[in-house]
Image: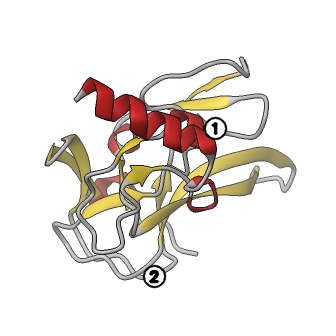
Amino acid sequence: MPYSGEQGVRIGPAPHGLGVFSLRSFRERELIGPVRGTVMEDPQYESDHCMEMGDRSALEPAPPFRYLNHSCHPNCALVELEVARPDGTRRGAEMWLEALCAIAPGEQLTIDYHWPAEHAIPCACGCPDCRGWIVAREERNRDELGRAWRQAGAAG
């Protein structure tokens, strides 16, 4: 899988804050770039941008991929790859961004956040198959989502 380099993206204004946009075309399954940042070994760690890396740690991403926005129909996904040193020894796992489909220059790069129901918030991604909530597909019928919906209605 070829790596295109982070020079192939830019950060810019998006409908919901900042987003990541392509500067060139990407092919389906092309690696766009490594997601760099700080690994937090605290299983309770949370932030607006953190990405879970298993049960015990999270990645606090650095720009540009810190600004990946959610879509219920994303064009990218986070993939964990095993990386080797030049001498062939195992360096460890790294998080990378991969194109799920062909992406044209200027398109916003999006991922599905796959949040658990207890952390769901209303979604405004605008895609035709929007779930209405930023939540994992398998969690969209959970009781916690119903409670979140009732609380959002009471707050609005």
Whether residue 72 sits left or right of residue 147 in the image: it is left
Which quarter shows the N terminus?
Answer: bottom right
Residue 143 position within the rendered picture, expressed as x and y whole percent measured from the top left: 61, 43
Looking at the picture, does residue 122 appear above or below residue 152?
Answer: below
Q: What residue sits 69% from the left and 40% below the top?
A: 53
Residue 27 position within the rendered picture, expressed as x and y whole percent measured from the top left: 40, 82
Nearest to the eye among marks 1 and 2: give it: 1
Report the residue marked by disc 1: 52
Circle 1 residues within 10 Å: few <14, some 14–19, many ≥20: some
Report the residue marked by disc 2: 28
Residue 116 seen anywhere in this rendered image of the structure: no
Residue contact between numbered discs 1 and 2, judged by CB atoms under 8 Å: no
Q: What residue sits 70% from the left and 57% below the top?
A: 81
Mark found first going from the N terminus, 1 or 2: 2
Quadrant in the rendering for residue 115: top right
Looking at the image, which is closer to me, 119 or 105?
A: 119
Looking at the image, which is closer to me, 144 or 69?
A: 144
Distance of label 1 from label 2 (alpha carbons): 24 Å
Amino acid type indicated by mark 2:
Glu
Residue 102 position within the rendered picture, expressed as x and y whole percent measured from the top left: 36, 82
Tell me, for residue 123, which label it has, or none.
none
Q: What residue sits 78% from the left and 44% below the top?
A: 92
Circle 2 residues within 10 Å: few <14, some 14–19, many ≥20: some
Outermost residue, right side: 89
Residue 85 seen anywhere in this rendered image of the structure: yes
Looking at the image, which is closer to me, 64 or 118?
A: 118
The figure's colour scheme reads secondary structure
